[in-house]
């Protein structure tokens, strides 16, 4: 029998139990840093050293944390379902948990590319992007043709090149699972609206969800516990 398709949209909450701070919870990253300084092209043009330092810290931390039971449970869905993970996270915990099909909507911490100073709204091609693992990037670190490297991250105001691919995945899904996102940042927050009318939507989040839609079942738990409940629900439906 053909496997059912599950699209999984994740946000910072799925990595919270691994010890990575979310953005908008109390004492989250955006309480401690100014978004305009570290997550916009204008911030980069004003003070690239500050931006590099912010992502260097995130990258160093990533080297010290591990996927949690929620990442592992999402990966294990592949045993029985055709799964694509669409993540807003720039960490690599879904990869390290074993998920094989992952769309990184907001870029990846372990990748860099040459900047295109003052002249980009994400104008780059994928072949300019390369892996640097967990090492730092500093001012003066350049590509072979001498251009300063920048984090391969989608900043506010920049285009989200993978959104079309993500929309296709959500449109094709038989089940949509959303884990640990405040659904405040577009276009990712609008993705659920592309699910078919017949597609059930499960949202795992310990807080109330900001969207109303008859298709939504809210599993009001942290990601690790919520994933156990989700798997129980869908396994019963398959019996
Ligand atoms: P947020 O910090 O906005 O939201 C995190 C969500 O996770 C909230 O709804 C929390 O209630 C929930 N949460 C907290 N702990 C949890 C846990 N243990 N298990 C499950 N859920 C938990 O993070 P995102 O929605 O991912 O973009 O933020 C979206 C984007 O805004 C990020 O990708 C980033 C940020 O600015 C860029 O930097 C471009």
Image (cartoon, helix red, strand yellow):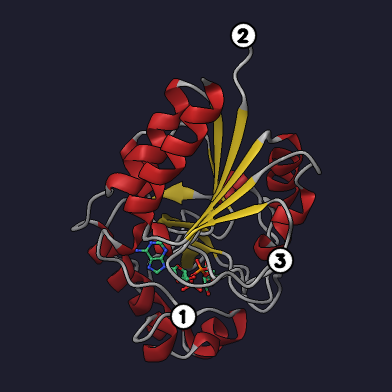
Look at mark 3 in the image and give the residue it sits on: 212
> Which image quadrant is residue 134 in?
bottom left
Q: Position of residue 129 (x, y in %)?
A: 52, 50
Decide which of 23, 140 is in the foreground and name it: 23
Label 2 crowd (10 A; few <14 / some 14-19 / many >=20): few
> Taking 120 as reference, is 139 left or right?
left
Look at mark 2 in the image and give the residue it sits on: 1
Examine the rendering and report whether any part of residue 115 can be seen. Answer: yes
Does the closest atom of ligand 1 sit within 8 Å of the Cβ of label 1? yes
Label 3 crowd (10 A; few <14 / some 14-19 / many >=20): few
Q: Position of residue 106 (x, y in %)?
A: 56, 60
Look at mark 1 in the image and give the residue it sits on: 24
Residue at position x 70%, y 54% in the image: 192
Q: Kindly indicate whether the residue at mark 2 contacts the one at mark 3 (C-beta within 8 angstroms).
A: no
- Sequence order check: which comes first, mark 3 or mark 1? 1
- Sequence order check: which comes first, mark 3 or mark 2? 2
The correct choice, above or below, for 171 with respect to 189 in the image is above
Label 1 crowd (10 A; few <14 / some 14-19 / many >=20): some
Which quadrant is home to the N terminus? top right
Q: Position of residue 203 (x, y in %)?
A: 55, 55
């Amino acid at each position: 029998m053909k496997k059912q398709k599950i699209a999984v949209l994740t946000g910072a909450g799925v990595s919270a139990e691994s010890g990575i701070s979310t953005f908008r919870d109390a004492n989250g990253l955006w309480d401690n840093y100014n978004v305009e300084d570290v997550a916009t092209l204008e911030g980069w043009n004003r003070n690239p050293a500050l931006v590099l330092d912010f992502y260097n810290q995130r990258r160093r931390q990533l080297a010290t944390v591990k996927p949690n039971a929620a990442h592992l449970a999402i990966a294990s869905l592949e045993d029985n379902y055709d799964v694509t993970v669409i993540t807003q996270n720039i960490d690599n915990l879904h990869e390290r948990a074993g998920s094989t099909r992952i769309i990184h909507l907001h870029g990846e911490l372990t990748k860099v590319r040459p900047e295109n100073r003052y002249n980009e709204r994400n104008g780059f091609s994928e072949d300019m992007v390369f892996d640097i693992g967990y090492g730092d990037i500093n001012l003066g670190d350049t590509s072979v043709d001498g251009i300063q490297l920048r984090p391969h991250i989608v900043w506010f105001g920049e285009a989200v090149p993978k959104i079309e691919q993500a929309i296709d995945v959500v449109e094709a899904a038989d089940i949509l699972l959303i884990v640990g996102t405040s659904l405040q940042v577009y276009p990712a927050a609008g993705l659920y609206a592309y699910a078919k009318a017949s597609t059930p939507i499960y949202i795992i989040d310990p807080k109330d969800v900001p969207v109303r839609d008859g298709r939504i079942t809210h599993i009001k738990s942290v990601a690790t516990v919520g994933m156990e409940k989700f798997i129980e629900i869908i396994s019963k439906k398959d019996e």
